[in-house]
Amino acid sequence: MPIVTSKEMFEKAYAGGYAIGAFNVNNMEIIQGISEAAKEVDSPLILQVSAGARKYANHTYLMKLIEAAEIETGLPICVHLDHGDSFELCKSCIDGGFTSVMIDGSHLSLEENIALTKKVVDYAHERGVVVEGELGRLSGIEDAINVSEEDAAFTKPAEVEEFVTKTGVDSLAIAIGTSHGAYKFKDQPRLRFDILEDVQQRLPQFPIVLHGASSVLTEYVEMINRYGGSMPGAKGVPEEMLRKAAEMAVCKVNIDSDLRLAMTATIRKHHAENPGEFDPRKYLGPARAAIKEVVKHKIVNVLGCDGKI
């Protein structure tokens, strides 16, 4: 099956009351763990690449690795740019074979955000590529994203119709209380389902996206702390809240921090138990397996997109 856009995925997800997992990739082991998990549970898949990951691993290497995942699994895979911050970056990814891009103009005024997003949409749609836009700003730190709590802002439902109509975007990322990174919340988060419901009423049958949706799985935080790390107070989004969002208008849920935590914790544990080990296969293999288990758990128990090929 060729690499695809997310259009059909989102149509089925909206109608079926589930969401597609969008998992960030940085190297071969991460791509393998994610794609093998999705294959085992028959799930459609979005592999997303940040600007930082693209710079680290090289666009060509990542595309060939994703191509290999598609060949090995036969899954419908969408290749998505996560948090594109310029027209030039989006254009480069579109020209380089991405089937979906996000243009993040959330730091701009509404008028500037609309203008930038429409420019990307016009270029992408002419080439059969879909576009995700964003209204509202999530706090937190992840790759090049660094937004303080003071600068964060919930999405204003009154703006969504104008934004979608004037830009022509195919999906919309909104801010309802999720946050980037592992240090998300001081207290138990309260996602603003009232905002999501309002947006859903204003944009019927339109796919909504949640960023910063890792749950910061306790077992891996504890493992990191046990083997020499220090992550006191790391908290994430409760998985039952993500499941509720997936049953509403949310068709795409971004997950990155949970993968990083699983990989790092497993490698730390291996080195602590095998201090003389220097064969990368011996610690990257278990790390890949840990990522696979996290992804299977998310697909089956949180997103509900297993068996939805």
Image (cartoon, grey):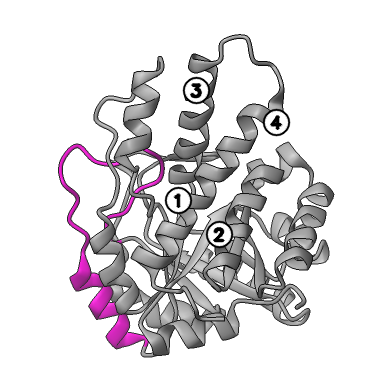
In the figure, 100 relative to 216: above or below?
A: below
Q: Amino acid at mark 1?
A: Val
Q: Is residue 168 visible?
A: no
Q: Which residue is mark 3?
A: 268
Callouts 2 and 1 close, C-beta under 8 Å: yes
* Front-most of residues 65 and 271: 271
* Front-most of residues 245 and 305: 305
For discs 1 and 4, the disc positioned in front in the rendered view: 4
Q: CA distance from mark 1 to mark 4?
A: 20 Å
Q: Residues within 10 Å of mark 3 (few under 14, many from 20)?
A: many
Mark before the other along the chain sequence, 4 or 3: 3
Q: Residues within 10 Å of mark 2 (few under 14, many from 20)?
A: many
Q: Amino acid at mark 2?
A: Ala
Q: Which residue is mark 4?
A: 281
| Kind of element beneath mark 1 | helix
Q: Position of residue 210 (x, y in %)?
A: 40, 63
Callouts 4 and 3 close, C-beta under 8 Å: no
Q: Which residue is mark 2?
A: 37
